[in-house]
Image: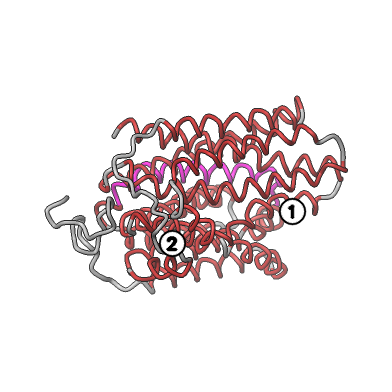
Amino acid sequence: MRRNTFLFVTVSMLSGLGGSAMALVSGIWILDLTGSTGLAALAGLCVYAPTLAGPWLGGLLDRVPRRPLVIGVNLALAAALLSLLAVRGPGQAWLIYAVSFAYGVGYVLVDAGETALLPAALPPARLADVNGWRSSAQEGMKLVAPLAGAGLYAWRGGHVVAVLAAAVPVLVAALYGALRLTRTVPASPAARPARVRDGLAALLARRVVRVPVALAAVSIAMSGFTTAALYDVVVTDLAMPSTFLGVLASAQGAGSLLAGLVVGRLVRRYGEIAVGAAGAVLFAVGCLGRCLPWWPGTVAASVVAGVGLPWTLVAAVTAVQTYTPQAMLGRVAGTANTAMFGPITLAVPLGSAAVAVGGRPPLVVAAVVCLAAALAVRPGRQPAAGGPDRWRISSGRERSRSLR
C-alpha cells in the first residue's frame, strides 16, 4: 500500500501546485487585460460556482468507471489550459473565464473521484492518515505556488504559466493510471440510475457522516465570512500594510501543514466527530485571536485557525469514505463537497457587507457560530473500527466484526 500512498500524496502535491498558481494568475491576467478589479474577481467565482453542482457531477462517477473518468478529466483540463495560448488581448478575456469554469468543473469531478478511489486503493485503517498527508501536501504547495506563479507571470507572461500548468494534469493522469486498485465496483448498465437524492439520503442517514460534514461546512463558511474582516483588521485596526496579509496566509498555511501530519492519528483514536468538533473550536479560537490589537497575536491566531480548518475537512472526508457504500461514493462525495464548500459562495459577500461595522464584529460572530456548532454535537457512541455501522468497502455490505 506504500506505493498507492505515495501516488496519492504526490497527486495532491501536484494538484496544489498547479491549481494555486493558476488561480492567482488568472485574476492577474484578466486585470492586466481589462484594468478592472471587479472583472478579475469573477475568475475566482467561475472556479467555485461548479461546486454547487457537486451532487449531479458526483452522480456521474457512480455511472461510469471512476479511474478512466478521472484520467480523462485531467487530460481535458490540460487541453483547456493550452487553449489560453490564444489569448492576445481584452477580446479574448472570455477564454480565461471559460477555462476557469472548466477548471472548476474538473476540480469537482476529480476531488469526488479521488475521494471515491481512495477506499478502493487503501485499507480503511489508512484513510485518515493519507487524507491528512494529502492535506499537508496541498497546504505546503499553497505556501510556494502563488508566489512562483506570480513571479513566472511577471517574468514570462501568462502563456508560459498556462503551458506549465497544463503539464500538471498530464502528470496527475499518469499517476492515477499507476494506482493499484484492489477493491472496485464494476459499473453495471442494468443497475438502477444513480439519483442525486440517494446520495443526499446516504449522507444524512448516519450521524457519524452528517455531523463531521456539517462541522466542516460551518467552519469553511465562516472562513469565507471573515475574509474581508481580516483585511480590515490588518489595515485599519493594526495599521499594517496590506502585504502583511501574506504573512498571515503563510502562518495559516504552516498551521495547516502541521495539522495534516497528526490528524490521521487523532481520527483513529478519537473518531471523526470528536476531531471535527475540535477543529471547529480551534478555528473559533483563531478568529477570536485575530481580534487582538497586537500583530504577533494575530500571527499566532492564524496558525491556530490553520490547524482547525484541515481537522474539520479531513474528519468529514474520512467519514464519507469510511461509512459510505462503494457504489454510492461518487454521489455522496459530490454532495458532501457541495455541502462543505457551497456555502462559501454566499458567506464571502455577506462577510464583505458585515465589515461595514468593523473588522472585529464579524470575527466574533464567526467564532460564536463555530463554537455553537461544536457544542451542539452531543456526545454519542462512535462506531468501532469493525462495528456494524461501518460499510464493507468492497461491496457496500456491512463490515464483519472480525476485521480491524
x 56%, y 52%: residue? 298
> Label 2: how many residues lie within 10 Å, few (<14), some (14-19) or many (20+)?
many
Q: Is residue 288 visible?
A: no
Q: Is residue 96 visible?
A: yes
* Residue with the mark numbered 1: 42
Q: Which residues are magenta?
A: 239-266
Query: In the figure, 332 relative to 249: above or below?
Result: below
Residue 243, by quadrant, is: top right
Sequence-wise, the earlier of marks 1 and 2 is 1
**Element under disc 1:** helix
- Using the rendered view, name the quadrant where residue 202 is placed: bottom left
The N terminus lies in which quarter of the figure?
A: top left
Mark linked to residue 335: none
SS majority, magenta: helix
Amino acid identity at mark 2? Ala
Instruction: Please name whichever residue, 309 or 74, is drawn nearer the observer in this view of the structure.
Output: 74
Question: Residue 280, which numbered label?
Answer: 2
Residue at x 35%, y 54% (from the top left corner): 321
Residue 198 image offset from top left, x and y in percent = 42, 68
Closer to us: mark 1 or mark 2? 1
